[in-house]
Image (cartoon, helix red, strand yellow):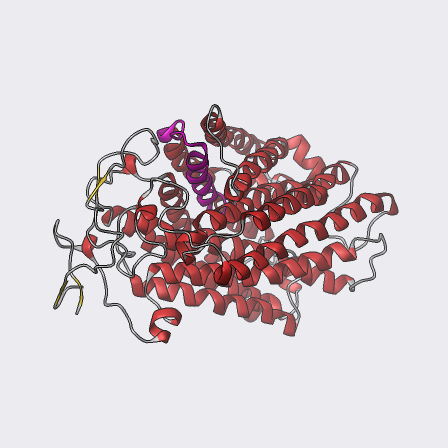
Amino acid sequence: MAIAAAPHGGGIADHIHPEPQSFVRRYVFSIDHKIIGIQYIITGFVFFVLAGLLAETIRIQLMHANGGFVSPQTYNEVYSIHGSTMVWLVVIPLLTGGFGNLVFPLQIGARDVAFPWLNMLSYWIFPIAGLMLFSSFLMGAPTAGWTEYPPISLEGQAGTSMWAAAIFLVGVSSTLTGINFVVTIMKMRAPGMTFTRMPLFCWGQFATAPLLMIATTALAAALAALFMERQFGVPFFDPTKGGSPVLWQHMFWFYSHPAVYIMILPAFGIVSEVLPTFSRKPIFGYKLIAFSSMAIALAGFMVWAHHMFTSGLAPYLQLPFMVITFVIAVPTGIKIFSWTATLWGGKIHYTTAMLFAMGFLVLFTLGGITGIFLAAIPFDLHLHGTYFVVAHFHYVLVGGSLMGIFSGMYYWFPKMSGRLLSEKLGKWHFWLFFIGFNGTFLPMHWLGLEGMPRWVSTYDPQFQFWNQFASISSFVMTAGILLFFANILYSIRFGKVAGANPWGARTLEWQIPSPPHYYNFKHIPTVYGLPYDFSQPLPYRGLEDELNDTPPPVAAGAH
């Protein structure tokens, strides 16, 4: 016996599976998209803590010009696993598997994703891959950074092969998630939920899903080739045997530049939900924001070689990659303009979620500006191997993606748990993180301009002051993150009960109880407008009895 199909018709749009009764089936091997989303979020934050410990190891090592905290070999292992963890086990899983699973099926009026069992498989591959990655420390972790360029990765310790296998599995999980999300958005939207009525977070996930499906295959092929060369001697990348180390760079960056957008497009979606809600204004330029996400996703496949200007790429090939990189800044600029226009004249509520969204605007814009600098061939040739690149990368992915993640946590935590996070602790978290982040990574710009190389465990003493400043600032940033976790643990038990819609938001997930029932919607709603105009009635029909405790009718054989 299961929840009956909604009255508007049968088919995949009405899909719902029986509600499990046992703890294991309900919370461990769950096929409920909401529980799977929470599993992704919890697991992602566990890996975030581990990656943070590695980051602090790096900063303690760099407190002094001569290092001394760990050996150079250990330092190389630490920064390699730190970068790999943050990219593949933290940011991507949190934004796609976590918030994607938790929120977007609710926002489109669906009762689950298209393939619930595949969704469960996608999740369980993820922690297994993470355990494999960290187990590489037991056999000698990789030492060539998160990019693992040959020939260093060919000569690396045994853990490099484990690294390749682990990231390959993460790619399998991401690909399955992308397939699931595309089918869900294409086939399971509520009646009236046209593409131009979808919430912008859904557009962020819709633009990301094809990247997960297509770009990841290039990385999988590169990882398989690296693994085979290391284990079986197949000469893909060894120039002494006829291979090409530059081939790895092409395959890796054909995935990894789109991966930058996998890590930022869902965060764009989060910001596009938070800003209008707490400005009490319709989002400015809805279609421009939506379609620019698709333009960014498409153009992301055309700029991979701007990471390779120092690799010996022919000059006549470098120029078009530089120009296209400049062009891809246009749709991003459209978004920043639209978000700023949304804030202009709004009745702004400075909640913690709003503070992180506004911090996102500042930090991501700064990271984008330095990205334009690095897109220029002469500038990149001069600074490619310096700390300027480290600064740029962190302003985009920590100042961008991670700020978006924190904004999403404060915004949707009531939907997950039924309770509000503490705003007082949240604002302390924001300011400690924001100040600590800028103190950590802003000096790296001029360290790079002055010539400090990245990937080094010791350095010229002239750079010591700003490295110490950055390290102390990183401790401030860490204090903010610890406060965030304390806030979560406190609020789960003692937080204020949120109610269905504590923010007065207008998207569908806020029109049902918090946390939602297993079946999401008693009756699939009908949509007849955009959710961002706060001066108009809600554009939904069929939600009249969602907040009472009466379950929907059941029928034998419904599924």
Residue 64: in sight, yes or no? Answer: yes
Give the residues drawn in magenta, as a range.
262-287
The quarter in which the N terminus is drawn is bottom left
Horizontal arrangement in the rendering, residue 482 relative to residue 534 (left or right): right
Q: Assess whether residue 283 is covered by the magenta stretch.
A: yes
From the viewer's perspective, is residue 529 above or below residue 524? above
Horizontal arrangement in the rendering, residue 280 relative to residue 79 (left or right): left
From the viewer's perspective, is residue 258 above or below residue 165? above
The quarter in which the C terminus is drawn is bottom left
Q: Nearer the viewer, residue 551 or 524?
A: 551
Q: Nearer the viewer, residue 496 or 517?
A: 496
Name the residue: 37% across, 56% down: 177
Q: Assess whether residue 116 is covered by the magenta stretch.
A: no
Q: What percent of the width, then of the height, locates residue 82?
A: 63, 58
Q: Nearer the viewer, residue 448 or 443?
A: 443
> What is the quadrant of residue 403 in the picture?
top right
Please name the predominant secondary structure of the magenta segment in the image: helix
Name the residue: 36% across, 74% down: 23
Name the residue: 46% across, 29% down: 347
Q: What percent of the width, then of the height, locates residue 549?
A: 25, 59
From the viewer's perspective, is residue 303 above or below residue 160? above
